[in-house]
Amino acid sequence: MTASVSNSLITVNPDELRFQFELEKQTYCDLKVLNNTGNYVAFKVKTTSPKKYFVRPNTGVVHPWDSCIIRVTLQAQQEYPPDMQCKDKFLLQSTIVNPNTDVDDLPPDTFNKDGEKSIEDMKLRVVYISPTSPQGSTEGDTVKNSTQKPDTNSSETVQRLKEERDANVLQTRQLQQELDMLKRRRNRRGDPGFSFTFAMFVGLIGLLCGLLLKLSLSSPPTE
């Protein structure tokens, strides 16, 4: 069971972002955000290294006593950090909003600390785990799925994602094959037409030359 961290509005699990670090490979960590109140709570995710991470959703609204999943993806890196230590930080801000508020309805100053509203800040650190380290095998589930679901559900989710990926790849290949087939059909339709026209042209030229030769041979010689 992974540890969680809480404030007066939300509970986040796990309490830190753990990524199984491999060169030139993307990896992700899921954060489960639970609303601890009977109010609508809006959240926003910030990071000290926005170019390295892809966060979806980075802003949202959690209904009373409900929860949501934030997926943080570490982009493929070209080199190892010194001693596998990461100094990146994440900030998860939360605040109470009006009932039935949708994320598209949030005003731009929702998370501005202007003194009139309470903004809760939660800081999360980043941990890189080497695949060869003891933690790499025991905490791999945290990296791939941090929602505290049973292992069977996690395996089913991974299998479903693989099947969807394979289906998309197969569909792309089929579309490419159909496109190539249409191109070949168009080329085949064009070639006979070109050959037939060319043959007619050559035949006409030959016929004219034959007529001219016949006329020249049949004409009486001039005195």
Image (cartoon, helix red, strand yellow):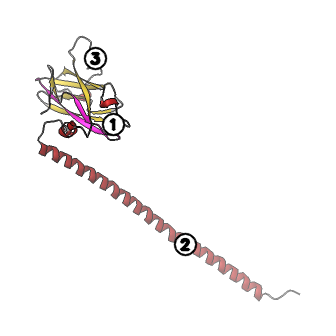
The amino acid marked with disc number 2 is Ser
Find disc 2 in the rendering and name its residue.
195
Q: Which of marks 3 and 2 is nearer the N terminus?
A: 3
Q: Is residue 85 above or below residue 165?
A: above
How busy is the neighbourhood of tag 3: few (under 14 within 10 Å), some, or many (20 plus)?
few
The amino acid marked with disc number 3 is Asn
Q: Earlier in the sequence, mark 1 or mark 3?
A: 1
Find disc 3 in the rendering and name its residue.
112
Find disc 1 in the rendering and name its residue.
75
Q: Earlier in the sequence, mark 1 or mark 2?
A: 1
Q: Do the residues labelled 3 and 2 touch (CB within 8 Å)?
A: no
Residue 198 magenta-highlighted: no
Quadrant position of the N terminus in the picture: top left
The amino acid marked with disc number 1 is Gln
**Viewer-side residue, 165 vs 146:** 146
Residue lying at the far top in this picture: please name it.
115
Q: Position of residue 67 (x, y in %)?
A: 15, 31
Q: Is residue 155 left or right of residue 111?
A: left
**Viewer-side residue, 5 vs 101:** 5
Instruction: Kindly report which numbered mark, 1 or 3, lies closer to the viewer in this rendering.
Output: 1
Q: Do the residues labelled 1 and 3 touch (CB within 8 Å)?
A: no
The magenta stretch is 15-38
How busy is the neighbourhood of tag 1: few (under 14 within 10 Å), some, or many (20 plus)?
some
Q: Where is residue 75 in the image (x, y as percent from the top left)?
A: 33, 36
Q: The residue tagged with tag 2: helix, strand or loop?
A: helix
